[in-house]
Each structure stands twice: as C-alpha cells, then as structure tokens.
Amino acid sequence: MARSDRPVAAVDIGGTKIIAAVFDGNGAMLSRIYCLTLAHEGPARVIKRLNQTIDRAIEKAGLQRSRVAGIGVAAAAIIDINRGLVTEAPNLPRWRNVPLPALISGEFNLPVYLLNDASAAALGEHRYGAGRGLNNLIYITVSTGIGGGIIIDGELYNGTDGCAAEIGHMVIMVDGPACNCGRRGCLESLASGTAIGRMAKERLAYGETSIMRALAGNVIEDVTSVTVARAARKGDMLALDVIRTAAGYLGIGLANLVNILNPQMIIIGGGVSSMGAMLLGPARKAIKAHAFKLPASTVRIVRPALGMDAGLSGAAEYARRKGRIAA
Amino acid sequence: MARSDRPVAAVDIGGTKIIAAVFDGNGAMLSRIYCLTLAHEGPARVIKRLNQTIDRAIEKAGLQRSRVAGIGVAAAAIIDINRGLVTEAPNLPRWRNVPLPALISGEFNLPVYLLNDASAAALGEHRYGAGRGLNNLIYITVSTGIGGGIIIDGELYNGTDGCAAEIGHMVIMVDGPACNCGRRGCLESLASGTAIGRMAKERLAYGETSIMRALAGNVIEDVTSVTVARAARKGDMLALDVIRTAAGYLGIGLANLVNILNPQMIIIGGGVSSMGAMLLGPARKAIKAHAFKLPASTVRIVRPALGMDAGLSGAAEYARRKGRIAA
C-alpha cells in the first residue's frame, strides 16, 4: 500500500485551543480530540500537551503510531518552512524560532509537516470544501486576528519561506490604528473581531447610544465583537454602523487582493464571518467600488463549507501530499 | 525546426510610444522600431500605426512575415486574456473592450498573444535579466503610473482573467488622494511620478522654499517628477523630502506584497526608479518597518537588468512559450 493511502494525523494549534484528529487515506475523519492551549504556560508545556493530544487522537482512532503515515501541523504563526521553525506567533507568547516539527517528530518518530493555520484552511476548502476544482482562490479567516491562505494552480502557495498570505498585515491605512503585530493600519487593525470590539468601545465611551452598554452589563470594557454582533441582530444602529465600517475596510483589503491576484474565489471564514450578510454585503460592495471591473466581476465571495475543521482537513491533506513527494 | 525556434515579433504599446521588435529563437534582438502612440487619435488609428510598426520591424529584420512564429503584444492596459480584449486602459483614451489580438492577427495572419506591459517586463527580467533562475519574483514599474508583474514557480502569473498584478491600485491610504483609476488612496496616487509631481506642486503652492520653482521657470504648474529629481540631486531639501515621502509609501506597498507573496526578489523599474538610492533607500527601510522579519530579510530589492526593453523581451518570450504550448 502506498504511504499516501495510510491514515494521517493532523493538529491545529491556536492561541485558545489545540485540536488533533486522524484522517483515513480518503480524508474521512476517524477521531478528533481537543484541549485548551493555555498559551501563557509557554512553548515547552504547550508542546507537551500538543503531543499528548495527537497521541490521544491516534489512540481514539484505534491505530498504532506506526500505522500513521505522517502528521500535518497547522499553527497560528509565521512559519519558516525551510528550517522547520515557528519564527513568531502573536497569539503564542514566547514562541521565537521554535523547531516545532522536530519536537513533534522526536516524540512520534513520524514525518511532521508544518504550515500556517489559515493556509491549511485554504487547502482544506480547496480539496474538500467550497473551492473544489478551482485553480486560484484566497481563503481569509476573520476572527480575533485576520489570516489568509492562497491557492495558485490548484496548489497551496507558500512563498519562499512558507510565510506567504499574511493578508491581515496588509497596510490599508497609513498611520491607522495600532495592530497586534506592532505596526499601524493593517487590515487586522480595522476589520478583525478585535477591531470591531475596539471601535464599538470607542464610540460607546464617546457617549453614543446603544443596547451594547446593557448587553455588557454597563461595563464598556467588556464589549467584544460578540456583543456587537448580538446588538446588530437586534437592530442596534451603532452596532450595525460599526460592522458596516469594518466590512468596508474588509472589502478594501479584499479589493486589493482582487487587483493583485485576480482570483476565482475568496472564501471568508473565521468566527466574525458568521455575521453573514451584515458583514459580506458591505464587503462585496466595497470590492466593486475599489477593484477593477473585470476581476471584480469574476471573483465569487463565499462562506467556507467545512467550518471550523477546514484547518485540520487541510493539515492532513498537506501531510498526505508532502508524504507522497517524499515517498 | 520547431515553431518555437523561429523568430518572434514583439510590440510594446504605452500611452506615449509604440515600440516593435523582432527577436531570434534565442532571444537576441534582430530589429527595433518605434513611433509615437498619439493616443488621443483613438483606437482605430493607433492600431493601424501599431500594425505598421510591427511590419517595419519585420522588414528591418530582413524577414518575410511567414517566417515569424507569432507576435507578443505588451499593452499598458487591463487585459481579458480569455476573450482577447483590452478591457480598459487609463492612458489610452476610448479603449473599451478592444479585441486587439484579433485586429493584429487579421493583418498578419499570425498568432498573437496579448499581455499586460508590466507583466511582460516581469517575464523579460525573469528570463534574461535580474531575476534569472528564481522561483518567485515581483516586478514593479514606477513611472507616470505604477504597474506590476508576478512570477510564481518560474512562470508568469496572469490570474483568472489575465489582469493580475495591478499593484499600483492597491489601496494603502483609505480616503487618500484621488487616483487616475477613479478611486482614492491607491499606491499609484502616493508613489508614482505623477504623485511626486503633485506633492511637490502642493508644497510649492503652500509657499515652501525650493529651487524647483526656478527650475520650472517660476511656473509651479510645470513642475514634474523630473523637476523634483533634478532638484533633489542638487541637494534641495523640499525635493528630497517629497521623494522620501513617496519612497515611504512605495515601501509600504512593497511590504504588503512581501507579507502577501513572500517573494525572493522585487525588481523596481520604470522612469522614476532611475532616482536610484534616493528612492530605494527609504523604500527598503519601510519594507523592514512594515513587513514581518522573515520575509523582509529574504526579499532582495533590485533595479532591472534590461532597462526599457524588458517589456519587449518579455512579450517575445511570452509568444515563444504560448506558441510552444499551441504547437
């Protein structure tokens, strides 16, 4: 049996949780285990917990480690694919040049393939989800931060070092709001969940009327993008306006990508994207307003088909493809 | 003899001039003819002149038309590669959905391959110039406007419709200055030759002291990016500051590309790039400041090796490759 037909494990590590899974050779999920990242404990403890989670997923799938062909690792991080390093990770404190693949493969004696989490989701959606059969697509995840993945010619585009598709850190407003990356005016600082929460808080502090104040128990500091979404669904004018503003910025970022990459599809995932039409409507309008006619009329803006498991599916697919090349 | 080894013709059509050339199978230039575009005369007359220019280049190369394998056409325009159309072209008035390849091949009875002029330059620099042997690179031309071309996996990246790499129309300043494309805050509106001229004029009109006033015969309206460059070379503080400002914006645009595409190289061509270190120094600094460490340390920022003929060379190379696929 070819190595690529054997089961593969996948793990998705983010700032909040770690999810591990095992997939068979056809991409069907055999098991799924999750635990909290507890990122504040630092890399060593997190990696120990990550290895335990993979181990439990393999066990739950009823497999011996030796039956697994490889492990795909999707991390919310800036990856150096050539040296096998997590170079930096805004949501994983103290991760600096961590040789994550070596620290996992040392435990399992299996080949480990590291990639960015949004790139993994792009690959998952392309192989099994909304983008099946397409040539070019962009996946963007809008949640606490904004990440991205790019498919070109039906393959994941990693760039030279493996850190391409940092869409959230495209500057669209010179000298704009401070971003988590330490710079200013990035798309993430204007259209992420964090940005939506910040804009709402600023306007509430300024005295604007809104049910968000009550929803947050009159503690403005507790308002988040979830509060904004809840208020907007109840028709709150301020909440709706904040979302419209963020969606407009999102649309400008997407229009830039449309002008630069002329893709067939942009898939908008991540927690904030569950706002649906409230967010996607104004974003689509902004794309029409800011991109050239031809590429703006070509691109389809859609929601993901795989939901939260796109990253896991993609990490497994990545391990399968890389294993095939290595075999 | 394979079709691809035969000579190919190439033509580069911009808002100011038309240049046609013939290249042998190894990429050596056999002839070169140029004439003015006289774009205000409209598409029909310009295309007639373009066909005459190609004809004269073939004749000057001492060839029969039937000996030429095909014609590569580089146009300063938004191309629809699938339908063979120039859809729009900011510097070619009244060009709307012009079937340029059909109008040329109807005259010569040869296959015609249309691409964007900056994409052609990217291909030329990759095949024969500064980017030889690289996997990923971005070419950016900074002149009256800002255009781009992207090489991925050693091949020209056209996108879905053939209009990818419109780098100049990436918004980096929401609600920024008006751009030729009709929108606001595009990189082109902040870092092109036109933008440099405009910023200088605004500051002169505001009363700032500079030798630019004298260089332009005391007519502020006559100040262009060429005036700014001349004054800067003489140490004029205002001119130097305007260039530094534009270069900073250019660097932010390039940093966005570095974060999105993680390329091995960015080649900066076009008339404005002849300012050299005055422009590239601050641009390099801005890339370091605005891109992630890893991709910023990878990318090499260089000048083109082929100068003004990169587009012609690339258009010929494109015709050669496309001809090979068709053969």
Image: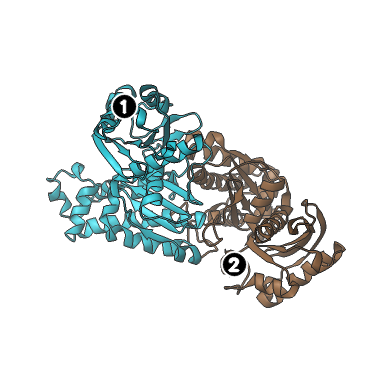
Chain colours: A brown, B cyan
Question: Mark 2 belongs to which amino acid?
Answer: Ala
Q: On the image, numbered disc 1 is attached to which residue? A: B51
The answer to whether one can see residue B192 in this image is yes
Quick one: which residue is furthest to the right in this view?
A: A62
User: Splitting the image into 4 quarters, where does residue A189 fall?
Assistant: bottom right
Mark 2 belongs to chain = A
Task: Indicate left or right for B131 with A118 as reference.
Answer: left
Q: On the image, numbered disc 2 is attached to which residue? A: A89
Real-space Cα separation, disc 1 to disc 2, in angstroms:
56 Å
Tell me the mark number nearer the camera, choosing from 1 and 2. 1
Give percent across and percent down for residue B115: 42, 37
Question: Mark 1 belongs to which amino acid?
Answer: Asn
Give percent across and percent down for residue B78: 43, 35
Give percent across and percent down for residue B155: 48, 47
Total number of numbered discs in the rendering: 2
The N terminus of chain B lies in quadrant:
top left
Task: Indicate left or right for A237 with B174 as reference.
Answer: right
Mark 1 belongs to chain = B
> Circle 2: is it few (<14), some (14-19), or many (20+) Cα within 10 Å?
some
Mark 1: which secondary structure?
A: helix
Give percent across and percent down for residue A324: 68, 57
Pick the front one: B108 or B136: B108
